[in-house]
Amino acid sequence: MNLFTDIRAAVMDALTAMEGAGTLPAELDRANVTVEPPRDPAHGDMATNAAMVLAKPAGLKPRDIADALAAELVLDPRISSADVAGPGFLNLRLAPSSWRAVVGTVLAKGIDFGRSDMGQGRRVNVEYVSANPTGPLHVGHTRGAVFGDALASLLDFTGHDVTREYYINDGGAQVDTLARSVYLRYLEAHGRAVDFPDGTYPGDYLIAVGEALKDKVGDAWVGQPEEVWLEELRDYATAAMMDLIRADLKSLGVEMDKFSSEKSFYGTGLIEKSIQALDDKGLIYEGVLEPPKGKLPEDWEPREQTLFRSTAHGDDVDRPVKKSDGAWTYFAPDIAYHYDKVTRGFDLLIDVFGADHGGYVKRMKAAVSALSDGKVPLEIKLTQLVKLWKDGEPFKMSKRAGTFVTLRDVVELVGADVTRFVMLTRKNDAPLDFDFDKVLEQSKDNPVFYVQYAHARVCSVMRKAGDAGIDVSDAALAAADLDLLAHEAELTLARKIAEWPRLVEIAGRTNEPHRVAFYLYDLASEVHTLWNRGHDAPELRFLQEDDPAATQAKIALVKAASVVISAGLGILGVTPAQEMR
């Protein structure tokens, strides 16, 4: 049940009636007719732009259309008034019974209230995290992991068929560096003194890997040249790091459907196949790029390379896919990977990248556009930096990582639920301050506490009602007399609950899961407000002594709010609190 959609349907029916009566010309384009909350809540519950949109094609004045539309709409028992404002906007107020009906619907549907079929089963691939397999995930990866996972859940909730995917960047020189770093820890495990040259990975997390390698191969590689151990150690070290990364993700509640390997595209013909697909479209050529703008690097020289004509698909410049020495560029396996995703039959691709990948957006979108003939859109969501604070100062580096704060550091300090919620309290492309003291604070200024406290309060009220002998089972609440919810404060909470299905669809359409976190805070605020008003107005208290019917109605209302909070937290990957400690 989406009350905004239902009232829009009522507007459409009224317009059809006006056409039948000759008040409006037939077959007007109504695609842009909307029903939305008014900018000022004092103007009503909903507003429609129908008269403004249809006036010009109908050859009529907006107010004349609005007056006639208002007369039709007030015949609907769900609508108590329809008032024309300004040049022709129509403000609607709904009957209290409309809001009460939402409560009953929520209790009947449970956490599926608000679930949408908007996606119509479209297959969506969401690729996120995709960190180099060279160490534990850091706090920047944490934000991308939370955002990508919540976005995937949101798309699933709105009727999409979602695949969560991780791309293992195991084909570049960084994996050679990892292997050499593990080799140093291997030597260390044999009692050798080692130094970590610049560019290697000195973090303590490789100590256990080096020791495990010693157990595996003994001293067979001690003192041996790289050609003896490098290739095998690359695979061993990558597997060990991916085990570590999977464990990090699991601690955050993130599970992938698929892991794809960059290395698998080398030597298998897959890169060649993807480049050939572009060549068949006339998009691959041999050429020399223009020099970079600004001061030229000392080692820059014009040289012929194999180029992808990415400017034909919206990029600023064409991009090299093969170097002058015949080696593939870093871009080539990425093209192959996205070609693989296109051929797997996805209707939409979404990549979640860190802010440092901003320069990669246009070329990757151009490649997917070319490979799919413009049929498969690629959306790239960039996650901005996270600044960590503790005790009023920037949080110190992690010893075990060597150079950065890890995902595991954050989760161990505040827990997965707090980490996930706080990471979604800003839009993905806005910087985020993560203050370890504030996120554990029990106050209204801490959004995760405030939302969890609202859910826990409802659970507490239900326990107390049960102890008092009041039946608050699902069946009893579903049968509650909701007409007893007559106070404006109670209807205000019902109105906020009714916004949930519309909010879900907007968030799913814009790929913005932070909207869910914002909404949950507002909904929790209404729960707390109603609770606090009961201090001064006894008739608003959830537990009404000697009036089980009123108690059941009030608990049905706040139970509906808690159901929506639970559903929203589920999308964010956060477990609802049953009690606060």
Image (cartoon, grey):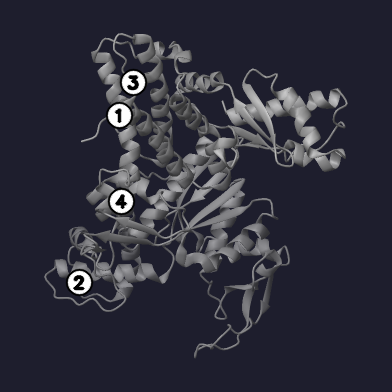
Kindly tell me whether residue 199 is visible in this rendering.
yes
Mark 2 and mark 4: Cα distance apart in space: 31 Å
- What kind of element bears circle 4? helix
Please indicate whether residue 207 sits to the left or right of residue 365 in the image. Answer: left
The residue to which callout 1 is attached is 457
Say above or below: 537 vs 213: above
Mark 3 and mark 1: Cα distance apart in space: 11 Å
Image depth: mark 2 or mark 3 in front: 3
Contact (CB < 8 A) between labels 3 and 1?
no
Callout 1 amino acid: Arg
Quadrant in the rendering for residue 373: bottom right
Mark toward the start of the polypeptide (3 vs 1) = 1
Residue 474 or residue 268, whichever sits in front:
474
Mark toward the start of the polypeptide (1 vs 4) = 4
Callout 3 amino acid: Phe
Callout 4 amino acid: Asp
- What kind of element bears circle 3? loop
Mark 3 and mark 4: Cα distance apart in space: 42 Å
Callout 2 amino acid: Val
For the C terminus, give its image quadrant: top left
Please indicate whether residue 64 sits to the left or right of residue 240 in the image. Answer: right
Q: Position of residue 471 (x, y in %)?
A: 33, 10
Image depth: mark 3 or mark 1 in front: 3
Residue 107 or residue 250, whichever sits in front:
107
Mark toward the start of the polypeptide (2 vs 1) = 2
Say above or below: 27 vs 169: above
The residue to which callout 3 is attached is 542
